[in-house]
Amino acid sequence: MSAVEVRACAKINLCLEVIGRRPDGYHELMTVFQVVSLHDDLRVEIREERGIRIDVQGADVPPGRDNLAWRAARAYRRMRGWPEGASIRLSKRIPVGAGLGGGSADAAAVLKALYEVDPDERSQPDFHRLAAGLGADVPFCMMGGTAIGYGRGDELIYLPDLPHCWIALVKPELSVSTAEAYDMLERSDFTDGDRADSMADVIEREGDIEEIARYVHNAFARPLTERWPIFGELKARLRDAGALAAEITGSGSAVFGIFATESEAEAVVAELSADGLWACVVEPVDAWDDPVTIVE
């Protein structure tokens, strides 16, 4: 038997624009993704006995077929005819329902772990198709770093690594259904993608973090803040503490603030934590800086 340990890093949407509704019922997006250092831990063990088992610690998430990591292992087996069985141990740190991509990151980590110990060295499974079939954010989570996403967010162009900065994350005591968030959008929330394009241009020419922060945006900010004013309050606290920009990530409910100094980020996180909120300081993670370790 082989066992692999791998990190599953969270993501934030530095910029998220909704262009409109597609003929297939999904929404057309343009978004700038960034992987951050907050991560879940997974151990994937190959077994001879048929079946996929998953044990989840640290969060109340589905432990079986409804878990995206479990579905990733099944999808890999269906594509490759291997492995016969797998046991997954998942230690959660990424909050659930926060817009931080925890489920997608877990699925991507399982795919990477299985590929690392696949006995057929000639195997080159179509990871993009496999990942996209699991969820729109999974292809990005496979590779990490910084990227601009099109379509549903699964069509990717990778960008240079983000300039170093510190990012404060805070989650209010509520979760937002992605479907509900999309239902709250109005036509006035749709934009043409210029902000995401402009942010990507700055990153490509290796502009500084202050310039990148000017283009931070989220199409869901208006409806979410109108229904739950706490989002506006948290963004204001982050900006008052020195954030270059503050915004909701994904469809909520986590909020991030970009800081030029670690001390400012640490100070506001300490204040938010003292108020009983989940909060932490993270850093950007560069592309491919996500080790997979074979332990047996």
Image: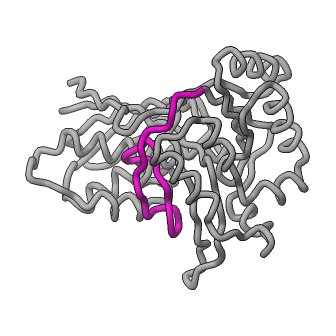
Protein image colouring? one colour
The quarter of the image holding the N terminus is top left
Q: Based on the picture, tell me whether residue 108 belongs to the magenta stretch.
A: no
Can you give x and y, in whole percent of width and height, for residue 205 in the image? Answer: 46, 46
31 or 86: nearer the eye?
A: 31
Q: Residue at left 64%, top 36%?
A: 210
Quadrant containing the C terminus in the rendered view:
top left
The picture places residue 24, in percent across and down from the top left corner, at: 55, 82
Residue 147 sits inside the magenta stretch: yes
181 over 113 or under it: above or below: below
Residue 147 in the image: above or below residue 208: below
Q: Residue at left 28%, top 31%?
A: 4
| Residue name at image x 66 percent, y 75 percent | 20
Position of 84 with respect to 141 (left or right) is: left
- Residue 193 percent location from the top left of the image: 61, 66
Q: Tell me which residue sits at (77%, 26%) in the image.
A: 242
**Foreground pick, 147 / 117:** 147
Magenta range is 141-165
Relative image position of residue 3 (x, y in whole percent)? 25, 31
Q: Is residue 176 left or right of residue 126?
A: right
User: Is residue 260 shown above or below 27?
Assistant: above
In the rendered image, the residue lying farthest to the bottom is 23
